[in-house]
Image (cartoon, coloured by chain):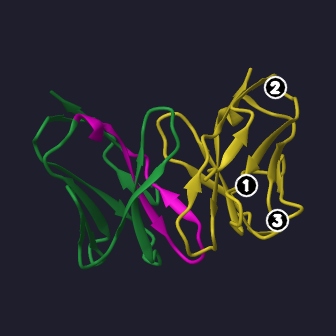
Amino acid sequence: GAGVSQTPSNKVTEKGKYVELRCDPISGHTALYWYRQSLGQGPEFLIYFQGTGAADDSGLPNDRFFAVRPEGSVSTLKIQRTERGDSAVYLCASSLTWENEQFFGPGTRLTVL
Amino acid sequence: RKEVEQDPGPFNVPEGATVAFNCTYSNSASQSFFWYRQDCRKEPKLLMSVYSSGNEDGRFTAQLNRASQYISLLIRDSKLSDSATYLCVARAAGNKLTFGGGTRVLVKP
């Protein structure tokens, strides 16, 4: 079946701009996660949704980052006033429930010039 | 200090040889542990869970030592296709995964 999909696959933007990154989880998965991976590092947790609500947003680095999942399926990660340090691969994962294996999408590579 | 630490490598391994590497974790509240595999410019994929009793999946053996707070992965009879970055992962309460920086393994003919 279809895995986790993310769009766009690549995004180049200028410092100060606003970006939105989209994640389509595996159908039926109630839990959705966002991670960020910088070059040479492991993924770093950002936020976790159970259904429509953010169950844990402790990894969001500051208030420029925000994520929503209004219908409990697709999620959007929003970054305001982008900075060069935001450049990374943003990974989305989903799992059937919070206890189950997380399946990762291919990521969105964000470059802030 | 990072919560999960790994030797970044690379570990250069002759094809057919055995390679082993560890990671250490600092959060004693961590409850579950995993090894993920990540190929270059691809997403991480679960390789195996890690149990205190030790567990094996084909050529891969994982071990957890809670007293010393380290996790190990051993790969026997290495294949060229085993070349990848291996990510050590700890999970505390909930389902938030904490990743190490990864250990790069290069299997050469």
Q: Earlier in the sequence, mark 1 or mark 3?
A: 1
Q: Which residue is drawn at 70% across and 55% down?
A: A25
Q: Name the tint of chain B in the rendering.
A: green
Label 3 belongs to which residue? A72
| Picture quarter with the N terminus of chain B | bottom left
Label 1 belongs to which residue? A60
Could you tell whether A41 is left or right of B51 in the image? right
Distance of label 2 from label 1 (alpha carbons): 19 Å
Q: SS of the residue at dot 1?
A: loop
Per the rendered image, the range of residues in magenta is B80-102
Q: Earlier in the sequence, mark 2 or mark 1?
A: 2
Q: For the residue marked with disc 1, what is the amino acid?
A: Leu
Could you tell whether A67 is left or right of B11 in the image? right
Q: Where is residue A88 in the image (x, y as percent from the top left)?
A: 63, 35
Q: For the residue marked with disc 3, what is the amino acid?
A: Gly
Distance of label 2 from label 3 (alpha carbons): 31 Å
Q: Position of residue A76 (x, y in %)?
A: 82, 49
For the residues tagged 1 and 3, is the chain the same?
Answer: yes
From the image, state whether disc 2 or disc 3 is nearer to you.
3
Q: Name the tint of chain A in the rendering.
A: yellow
Considering depth in this image, is B41 or B25 the residue closer to the camera? B41
